Amino acid sequence: MTTPTIELKPSASPLADAERAAILTSPGFGRHFTDHMVTIKWTEGRGWHDGQLVPYAAISLDPASMVLHYAQEIFEGLKAYRQPDGSVATFRPDKNAKRFQASARRLGMPELPVETFIEACDALVKQDAAWVPAHGGEESLYLRPFMIATEVGLGVKPANDYLFLVIASPAGAYFPGGVQPVSIWVSEDHVRAVPGGMGDAKTGGNYAASLLAQAEAAAKGCAQVCYLDAVERKWVEELGGMNLYFVYGNKIITPTLTGSILEGVTRDSLLAVARDLGYEAEEGRISVDQWQRDSENGTLTEVFACGTAAVITPVGTVKRTGAEWTQSGGEPGEVTLRLRQALLDIQRGTAEDKHGWMHPL
Ligand code: COI
């Protein structure tokens, strides 16, 4: 099926330089959006068509659009970084494009070609390059590609019409405390995903499913919720929107992908970055009991969360029913900070990109 070129229809009134500069000094996460967005339609029998880069604006949907009823929706998250010479590069967009295809297959949606996904992200970043924060800080431009079912009707079936969009948002730290340790509530009542379900697809439903447990975590004074496997309620899976790593001295371990865990791009990158730095890095199963025991006996030296939005965020206090403990004395751990810096150095263009991850624009 042919893929559309993206027709440029630039905004006649982008945000004034001074207003944009004020936002970029403290963007927060997901609160401000750039001047443009990309839209591409898909129709049964016709395929992808009408690719456009247009001014950022509200979209109009029929109230009976299928996405509003049966949640046929998928999304991605990736970032563009200002490089030392002032140019801009995105991090592993091909990996996000392939995961977007995998999510589409799981939800019965059409697969956007990898090159179209990348072209759409490139077009938006090039058009709104002034929104990519300055080199050297924590900030970057977060891209949110997503696709929704737009066919009108209430029958439950894969839709015949879809809309793919890319929007962009300047991003600082995901957690208001920056790289300060986050507290975790281990939910033993609610699960995020089940074997054979959609846990490894990046779809809004998984995030909706996490909100009640997330609210419980907040009520326990914690910033994030950690899910256990749905069957034995024993094995650590992931947080509401990020993967986990456990540090045992010189070895780092992340939960094995079981089908109910999202295959994070940061998670995958860290396996390689850690090995480059001389650590042992592997996937494995960690039970919540082992987590508690090894923290208490001191063999589990650090725990951190990772994701595109969260980058690498240390875990501090951990709470579960009847127990509470603290990782690495409540301070960011040495291995955590070293891995974080090594990954950010690649993304910001100050370390060699030996894996060919950066995509210059
Ligand atoms: C990302 O890290 O890109 C995500 O989609 C997770 C979400 C919690 C912002």
Image (tube, helix red, strand yellow):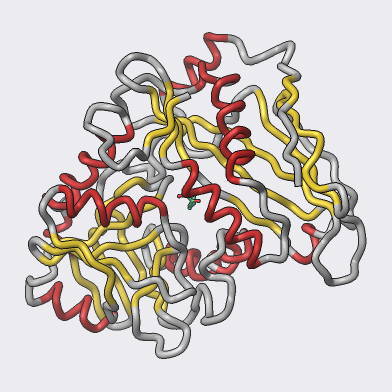
Considering every residue shown, the one lying at the far front of the view is: 1
Q: Position of residue 285 (x, y in %)?
A: 29, 78
Quarter residue 59 falls in:
top right
Considering every residue shown, the one lying at the far bottom of the view is: 232
The reply, left or right, for residue 29 in relation to residue 123 is left
Task: Judge whether 120 appears above or below 219 on screen.
Answer: above
The reply, left or right, for residue 166 in relation to residue 351 is right
The reply, left or right, for residue 270 in relation to residue 162 is left
The residue at 34%/46% (across/down) is: 311
The residue at 30%/18% (across/down) is: 84
Q: Position of residue 117 (x, y in %)?
A: 61, 41
Q: Position of residue 18 (x, y in %)?
A: 52, 9
The residue at 79%/50% (across/down) is: 162
The residue at 46%/29% (across/down) is: 27
Q: Number of numbered discs present?
A: 0
Quarter residue 157 falls in:
bottom right
The reply, left or right, for residue 345 in relation to residue 7 is left
Q: Which residue is more in the foreground, 351 or 128?
A: 351
Task: Judge whether 88 appears above or below 107 on screen.
Answer: above
Quarter residue 201 falls in:
bottom right
Q: Which residue is more in the foreground, 281 or 207?
A: 281
Q: Position of residue 85 (x, y in %)?
A: 33, 14
Q: Which residue is more in the foreground, 1 or 255?
A: 1
Task: Judge whether 310 appears above or below 127 on screen.
Answer: below
